[in-house]
Image: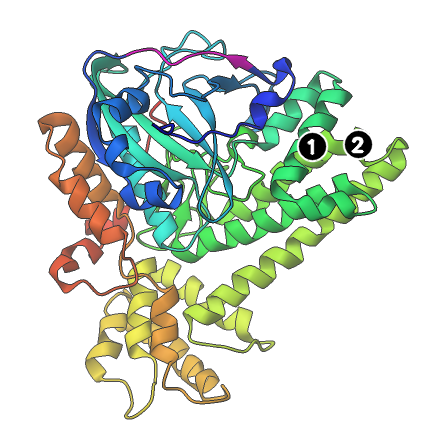
Amino acid sequence: MTALFPFDNSFARLPDRFFARVVPTAVEAPRLVRLNRTLALDLGLDPDRLESPEGLDVLSGRRVAEGAEPLAAAYAGHQFGQFVPQLGDGRAILLGEVVGRDGRRRDIQLKGSGPTPFSRRGDGRAALGPVLREYLVSEAMHALGIPTTRALAAVTTGEPVIRETVLPGAVLTRVASSHIRVGSFQFFAARGDVEGLRALADHAIARHDPEAAEAENPYRALLEGVTRRQAELVARWLGVGFIHGVMNTDNMSIAGETIDYGPCAFLDAYDPATAFSSIDRHGRYAYGNQPRIALWNLTRLAEALLPLLSEDETKAVAEAEAALTGFAGLFEAAYHGLLNRKLGLTTMRDGDPALAGDLLKTMAENGADFTLTFRRLSAAAPGAGPAPEPEAVEAVRSLFIDPTSFDAWAERWRRRLDEEPGPVAGRQALMRSVNPAFIPRNHRVEEMIEAAVERQDFVPFETLLTVVSHPYDDQPDFARFAEAPEGGGRGYRTFCGT
């Protein structure tokens, strides 16, 4: 019989100081909550075997699969601006890597599978609520078209975990292009381990930026690749109102994927100062700060890479600065291009950033819901045929405390749309393709978690997962999931869940 996972492990072949070899801790009574069968097939796996007792044993950590080389990776990181020289996988164990049907290499990792040498006196376990949150939100992000880690499976352990209260335990099987973080490079830089730093950079280039190997300065090319991916990723976050919540350097993947869905949440009423995380007391990682923090994190990566950029310190700094200089332009191009598409514009003109910015400013002043405003604009946009129905326009106006403030902006918007070249027949379809009807509304996520944790009722989880897996479709049977919460979501708080 073929192996359950056709592992081909490259990270495990790096020197031993890159990780600690550790096996998952067996649990008493695992139960499969959900298997992502579609993802399993994409990875070239057999979903029926993964759902079997054999598969459940591996997904829960009771058994190490054939070919696995379980390990906990070492890394450092800046946490809320403060450097911690050693962090590492404290409750996650990398089983190995598989190459999917598309030829892409991906990590298979268990989260909540027991203590590791990096657990820092923690139990290495995960509670059911955070596992379901990460499963649902990461799959929603994938459906929204945003690069992200994926969820292959969620399993309950039959064992309690102790946090503020006693909670049911669970294990998440996470799939990622890799788990290499900015903090991974910081780990070796902090120790003056240039050879370790070089080995990690060479591994990262081979895995994520193979064309960089042919560049005049491969390590600058690596930095430029990470910079481009992060600029585009954060622009996409802003486009759907996503707030990561804990953008520490150890939570920033160099693969350009969204990773570590701890205290994450989505905007309801638009306010760029929104920060939901209970531990982000000063708004460091607020919605509107995310581009600035991404560049700050990239600067920390550049500092770590200095010994590789050049033996001459002055030249190394110049190489790093040159690579980072591109961030602003990359981000602005991605962000304003996305805003234009959200407004139905296919060309870019000088006044477009101001047009979009004025709408956002008016939304903030009027407490307008971010997702609903843009989705309803899709229906109110002038298309082929008669002018928009008054009901569609009124549906947008009703989201503003002062509807006349929207009227003034909308007149400018319509004039700008009139300047667009070509047919207008596909305008509404274009807008609907980038303005989701459904996001994982925070109050719905909490309802789902409460049902699962308090009543072992997973129907709300399955229903919400179905809805957010098709975010751009109308889904009239699930219209209630598009509704904003009372009060615009103000006062909502998220918690890390570790």
The amino acid pointed to by label 2 is: Leu
- On the rendered image, what quadrant is the N terminus found in? top left
- Can residue 244 be seen by looking at this rendering? yes
Kindly state the secondary structure of the residue where label 1 is placed.
helix
In this rendering, the label closer to the viewer, 2 or 1: 1
Query: Which of 235 and 180 lies nearest the eye of the viewer?
Result: 180
Query: Which of 467 and 265 lies nearest the eye of the viewer?
Result: 467
- Point out the residue furthest to the front here: 1
Taking the magenta stretch, the answer to whether it contains residue 22 is: yes
Q: Is residue 378 left or right of residue 98?
A: left
- Point out the residue furthest to the bottom here: 385
- The magenta stretch spans which residues? 20-26
Q: Report the number of discs.
A: 2
Taking the magenta stretch, the answer to whether it contains residue 432 is: no
- Seen in the picture, residue 17 relative to 485 is either above or below; the reply is above
Reading the image, the residue beneath label 1 is 201
The amino acid pointed to by label 1 is: Ala
- Can residue 405 be seen by looking at this rendering? no
Q: Identify the residue at image location x=73%, y=51%.
A: 325
Query: Which of 477 and 67 lies nearest the eye of the viewer?
Result: 67
Say how the picture is coloured. Answer: rainbow
Prevalent SS, magenta region = loop
**Contact, mark 2 vs mark 1 (Cβ under 8 Å):** yes
- On the rendered image, what quadrant is the C terminus found in? top left
Say which quarter of the image contains residue 201: top right
How far across and down, in percent of the image, does residue 448 sit?
Answer: 18, 38
Q: Identify the residue at image location x=30%, y=52%.
A: 268
Kindly state the secondary structure of the residue where label 2 is placed.
helix
Reading the image, the residue beneath label 2 is 308
Q: Identify the residue at image location x=38%, y=80%.
A: 427
- Seen in the picture, residue 128 relative to 464 is either above or below; the reply is above
Q: Identify the residue at image location x=37%, y=72%.
A: 431
